[in-house]
Structures are given as C-alpha cells and as structure tokens.
Image (cartoon, grey):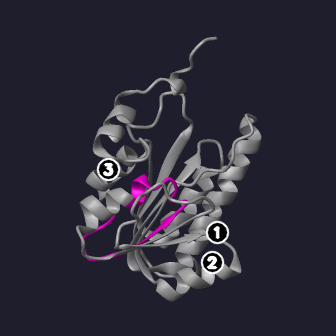
C-alpha cells in the first residue's frame, strides 16, 4: 500500500513531538503570533475548537507566561495532561446556548483564536461550505465576545467564502488580511483570516 504524505512525519510533526505539543498546528499560530502579536501576557484568550490542545498549550507556555487566562472549548477533549492552570476548558458546542452562556460569563476577551475545521467528507464543495459556516459562526461569536481593540484568528478552507468574510472583517477591524502559514501542508487548502484591532460590535452599522 502506498504511503501518503500525511502518513509520514514531517519536520513540523517531529518538532511538535520533541517540544511536547499534541499536533504540528502549533507552528501555524507561532508564525501568526510572530507577524501580528495576536496575544500578549496578562490577556484573556478564547480558543474555539481547541482540541487536541496545541494552540492552548502554546498560548499558555509562550504568550501568557503565567499571566492571563485561556478559555478553551471543543466537542472533543484536550489531549493535555495536566490541563494548565491558566486554562478553563469546556467540552461542547461553542455555538450552543449553554456553552455560549459559559463563554460570555468569562468574557470579554482580548483575543479569540480558532483552528477549528469541520469533519471532512472528501467532497471539496461540501467541505468548503461547512468550513465557511464554521468560520461565520466564529466571527459571530467574536462580535459578541471580543473587547474593543481585540484580535481574531479564524481558519477557513480556501474557496469557502473567505473573500466575503474578509470584506466583512475589514469593516469590523482596523486591519484584516489572510495568511497561509509555512506550517500548512503543501496539499492543504486551508488559510487563516486575521483581524487586528476590533472596532466594536456596532462597526458594521457605521
């Protein structure tokens, strides 16, 4: 049987293992952080779609440095043992009324990050549509939960309406752009929408 590139551990996967991260996705956030300074020590961060936990752990270790708080949410459990003391984790649907209420109680947030992706079907049209719906949900959550001046990172599949979402983000943020980090796999069609300096929930109406 042929071995696909995704079955082979690349340099990012090997590095993640050495450094104790559950997944190679941590290096996507590392590049985003280096370029845009999404998170600063002492802040409160919401991580949507946090499992297995690499972004949460990186924020805890490298960005907050023991000063601040992370609220993480995912349908699946975090693969972190122990869960860092700076983290409140909720297992469930971030968009459900019950979980949304818990997130609101702990907000507002200085930054919201999301590496969430839908379950894929292999049909690109279906998968990009699902990704677009998920990204729209995260953006809607951010309008509710971000502090004025806050920052946002959302993953979306290319072809999944990212241009329309980017146009909307440019109304809501001082700066908004896309980035495909170097750690994305060559055959991946994911990209990231980045918003810097949230103008406030009424920005779209001005």
Residue at 31% from the left image edge and 66% from the top image edge: 39
Q: CA distance from mark 3 to mark 1?
A: 26 Å
Sequence-wise, the earlier of marks 3 and 2 is: 3
Judged from the image, the secondary structure of the residue bearing numbered disc 3 is helix
Q: Quick check: 188 left or right of 133?
A: left
Residue at 27% from the left image edge and 63% from the top image edge: 63
Q: Nearer the viewer, mark 3 or mark 2?
A: 2
Q: Magenta span covers which residues?
A: 37-56
**Dot 2: few (<14), some (14–19), or many (≥20) neighbours within 10 Å?**
some
Whether residue 53 appears in magenta in the rendering, the answer is yes
Whether residue 161 appears in magenta in the rendering, the answer is no
Where residue 109 appears, as percent x and y from the top left, is 42, 78
Q: Quick check: 40 left or right of 53?
A: left
Q: Quick check: 88 left or right of 18?
A: right
The answer to whether the residues at label 2 and label 1 have Cβ atoms under 8 Å apart is: yes
Judge whether residue 159 can be spotted in this image: yes
Q: Nearer the viewer, mark 3 or mark 1?
A: 1
User: Pointer 2: what residue?
Assistant: 99
Residue 123's quadrant in the figure? top right
**Looking at the rendered structure, which numbered label has been put on residue 77?**
none
In this picture, is 122 found above or below 36?
above
Sequence-wise, the earlier of marks 2 and 1 is: 1
User: Pointer 1: what residue?
Assistant: 92
Most common SS among magenta residues: loop
Where residue 100 appears, as percent x and y from the top left, is 62, 79
In this picture, is 177 found above or below 16?
below
Where residue 6 appears, as percent x and y from the top left, is 53, 27
Where residue 170 appears, as percent x and y from the top left, is 49, 64
**Looking at the rendered structure, which numbered label has been put on residue 30?**
3
**Dot 1: few (<14), some (14–19), or many (≥20) neighbours within 10 Å?**
some
Q: CA distance from mark 2 to mark 1?
A: 7 Å
């Amino acid at each position: 049987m042929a071995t696909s590139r995704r079955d082979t551990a690349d340099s990012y996967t090997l590095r993640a293992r050495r450094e104790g991260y559950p997944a190679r996705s941590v290096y996507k956030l590392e590049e985003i952080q280096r370029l845009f300074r999404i998170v600063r020590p002492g802040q409160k961060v919401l991580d949507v779609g946090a499992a297995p936990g690499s972004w949460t752990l990186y924020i805890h270790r490298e960005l907050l440095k023991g000063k601040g708080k992370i609220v993480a949410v995912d349908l699946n459990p975090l693969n972190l043992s122990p869960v860092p003391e700076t983290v409140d984790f909720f297992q469930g649907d971030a968009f459900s009324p019950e979980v949304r209420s818990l997130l609101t109680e702990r907000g507002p947030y200085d930054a919201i990050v999301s590496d969430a992706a839908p379950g894929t079907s292999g049909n690109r049209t279906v998968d990009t549509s699902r990704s677009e719906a998920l990204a729209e949900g995260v953006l809607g959550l951010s309008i509710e939960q971000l502090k004025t001046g806050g920052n946002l990172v959302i993953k979306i599949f290319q072809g999944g309406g990212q241009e329309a979402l980017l146009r909307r983000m440019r109304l809501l943020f001082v700066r908004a752009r896309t980035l495909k980090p170097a750690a994305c796999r060559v055959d991946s069609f994911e990209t990231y929408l980045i918003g810097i300096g949230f103008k406030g929930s009424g920005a779209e109406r001005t």
